[in-house]
Each structure stands twice: as structure tokens, then as C-alpha cells.
Image (cartoon, helix red, strand yellow):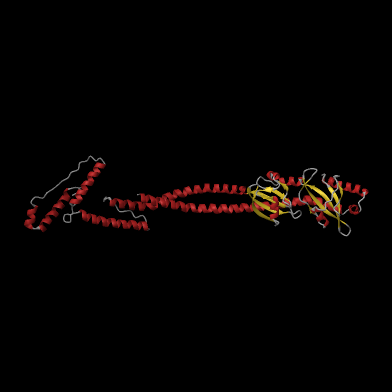
Amino acid sequence: MGINRSIKNKLFCLLILIGALPLIIVISLGANNMINDLEETAKSKGLLRNLMVSEHVAELLQKNFYVLHAVALEPIIIDYVQKPSPELERIIFKRLNDINDLFDDNNLSAITAANADQLIRTDNSSLVNIKKRRHFKEAMQGNDFVSDVIVSMSTGEKIVVLEVPIKDENGKPIGLLQRNFDLSALQDFVETQDDDKNSVVILDRSGAVVATSNEIQKLSTAHVGDLSYATLADEIKDNFGVRRMNIDHEDSLVIYARSELTDWLILSIQPYHFILDQVYNKIAQAVFIGFLMLSIVGTAAYFLSIKFTKPIVEITKAAEEIVSGNGDIYNLEVMSNDELGKMAEAFNKIRSARDAYQLESELDKLTKLYNKTTMANLCKRKLQKSKEFNNDRFMALYVIDLDHFKEVNDTFGHQFGDEVLKEFARKLRKSFRPKDCI
């Protein structure tokens, strides 16, 4: 029976595997598709967030540029750059302070001549030569320019310098108008873009942090994960895209875009574990439902395995009974027309043939009564069963001898003697019960 149980167990496992395999495939493919969908969603939201930040940066800076352009075009400014005088200086100084009143701040404004010498500063600090500074070179080529991040020596705050050229009547740059821009307003806006899952970082051309919504990144203005911000800014050449990077020592999805006005790099960062957490939650739900379905499949598989292996178990049991010498074996019931049904039919034929051969070997050919060997075996079995079941019923054994049978054979011949034995056997069968062994 161990073999039969093994067949049943194997069939049960096979049915479970057939039921579980599609579930595993669906969960695996579903998880992969979910990761792709969540990545695409994160990319779309990141690009939209970057666009909003870029537009806000442009809006803040353009307000300053509009005013600076208007001031740079004033004839009194052009005259002052070409021919500085104390009288004009007082007027210009007040004009530049009016800009602060317009923006409600106290940021530095300054005018620089073509030789890079500053002519006037609203903070009354010492005038310096800025010939080596990039924003001076850009302005003198006739370009508006936003500098990289600078830490103000007077306030300690991060600022950038906005430069516009001052041009003569021929359109030739003769100097520049400069105004410092405090990044606090940009920082306040960027902080509103943090939603606990995403953070925003703005880097200037050198990789310095212009503004960030992440408190950790505020403390680390130079490095990000295993790379420096400067390296990151240098590596990314295209205007927008997506990268998977180590940010603050955490695997993150980085969506980046470049501001057209400033050439700053705007990063929208989402730690990857937020995506995986959503996937794990969905997988957990799917696994729970899957196990529920699998338990139903398992129950069905258990009963199906019993049903499918029952004919094999019955055939095996019947074969073992025959081998053990038990003759009380009925024909197997044929339940189907498949191979198992044919196997049962074949077994019934074998059993019938075996019964015929066994009966022939057990009976005396002449009288059709049990022969000596069969009687000895039957007596042993009945005694054994009586002992096993504590049967207290009596058993009787008759030994009958025919007197003068040898004389009949000698006188009338063996053929007549055989007829006597046949007749005697017939009368014995009529004298005993059908269940008695003769």
C-alpha cells in the first residue's frame, strides 16, 4: 500500500503544482508590471514637478530681469557709466535703492564699468574689480547671466548674482548692472514640493545646492551618496531624463530637468523603497488571495487524487489478496472506459483464469471434491481464523472410509470403481451444507 499512497501523494502534488504555477506566474508578472507602472508614474509626476519648479525659478528671476533691463536702458544710467560724476552718483544710488523698495528686500545692487571696476554699490562696501568673474565676462558679451551660488559675506545666506549689460546707443556693452538675488524665496517654494516620498534638489552649474526640500541634503551640500553633486552635474549633459542612483546612501529614482534660463539642474528624487513598498503590499494581498484559492484547489486536488487513484489502490489490494492466497475476491467494478477501466477488466479476466486454474488444482478430477492438499490448507486457515477472532464455535472433522472398495475394483474393474466414487461424492454433497468443505 506504500506504493499506492506514493502515487496518490505524487498526483496530489502534481495537481497542487498545476494550480499554483499559474498563480506564481501571474504574481511574478504582475509585480514586474506594477514596478514598471509605478516607475512610469513616478517619472511623470517627477517631470511635472520639475516643470513647476523650473517655471517658478524663471518667474522669480524674470521679475528681477525685467526691472534690471528697464533700469539699464535709462539714459541717466548710460550717462553715468560713460561719465561718472558725484551728482549722477547720488541720483543713481537712490534709483538702485528704489529697486529694493520695489521687491521689498535689501539686496545688493551695483554698476560696473567696462574695465571691470565697480562704480557704485548700494551696500556702501569697498568697490572691487570683477574682471575675472564669469558673470562680468558674460555681461560684457551682451548676455544676461545668472551666477552660480555664492555665500554672502555680509549675511551668510546663499545668493546668486543677476547681471544685465548696459549698452550705449549703438548697442555695444559699456558696463553691467548687477543685483544679488536672495534664494530664500526659492527655498521656501521648493520645500512645499516635498510630499514625504519625493524631494526636490536644485543644483547650479558647479553642482552646488541652490535649494532643496530635503533636510538631510541641506546638511550635505557637497556630496550625494557615493558621488559629489559636482560630479553629478558634470555627468548629466542632456536637458531631462531619469536615472537610478544612490542618493543619501539610498537607492533612488532621480528624474532630472535643466532650467533653460539658468542652466540649473532640477532633481526630483524618490527613494526606491517607496515603489517597492507599494509592490510588496500588493503582492501580500495577492499572495493572501492566492493562498485562499490554493487551499480550495488543494482540497479539490486531494479528493481528485483519491478518486483517480482509487481504482489503482483496489487493483493493488486485490492482487495482494490473491498473492496471499485469499480466494474470496470479487470482480473489480469497472467505473470508467479509460485505461484504468481497461486495467480493471484485464484484472478480472486474470482473476477468472486464476480461479479456474486454482479450482482445477484444488479439486479431485474424478469426484470434484477437494483433494488432500487443499483440505490440509483449508483446515489450517480455518483454525488460524478461529484463533485470531477468538471464535468459540466448535469445528467438526469427519474422516470417512469406504469398506470393501478394493474388492469392487478388483471384481468389477476400475471404471466401475470410479462410478462408485462419483456417486458417493454426489451423496456427500447432498448430505452436507454448501459452506462445508468436502
Left/right placement of residue 160 relative to residue 392 reads right
Instruction: Point out residue 242 in the picture as x, y percentages from the top left corner.
Output: 66, 54
Q: In the depicted view, which residue is nearer to us: 187 or 7?
A: 187
Q: In the depicted view, which residue is nearer to us: 272 or 113?
A: 113
Instruction: Point out residue 193 in the picture as x, y percentages from the top left corner.
Output: 70, 47
Instruction: Point out residue 325 in the picture as x, y percentages from the top left corner.
Output: 26, 50
Left/right placement of residue 381 relative to residue 211 reads left
Q: Residue furthest right?
A: 87
Q: Height in image: 198 above or below 409?
A: above
Residue at screen point 15% across, 51% down: 427
Q: Is residue 81 visible?
A: yes
Left/right placement of residue 113 relative to residue 423 reads right
Residue at screen point 60% across, 54% down: 36
Instruction: Point out residue 211 in the picture as x, y percentages from the top left corner.
Output: 73, 47
Give the total of numbered labels.
0
Q: In the depicted view, which residue is nearer to us: 22 or 348?
A: 22
Q: Is residue 329 visible?
A: no
Q: In the depicted view, which residue is nearer to us: 390 or 134?
A: 134
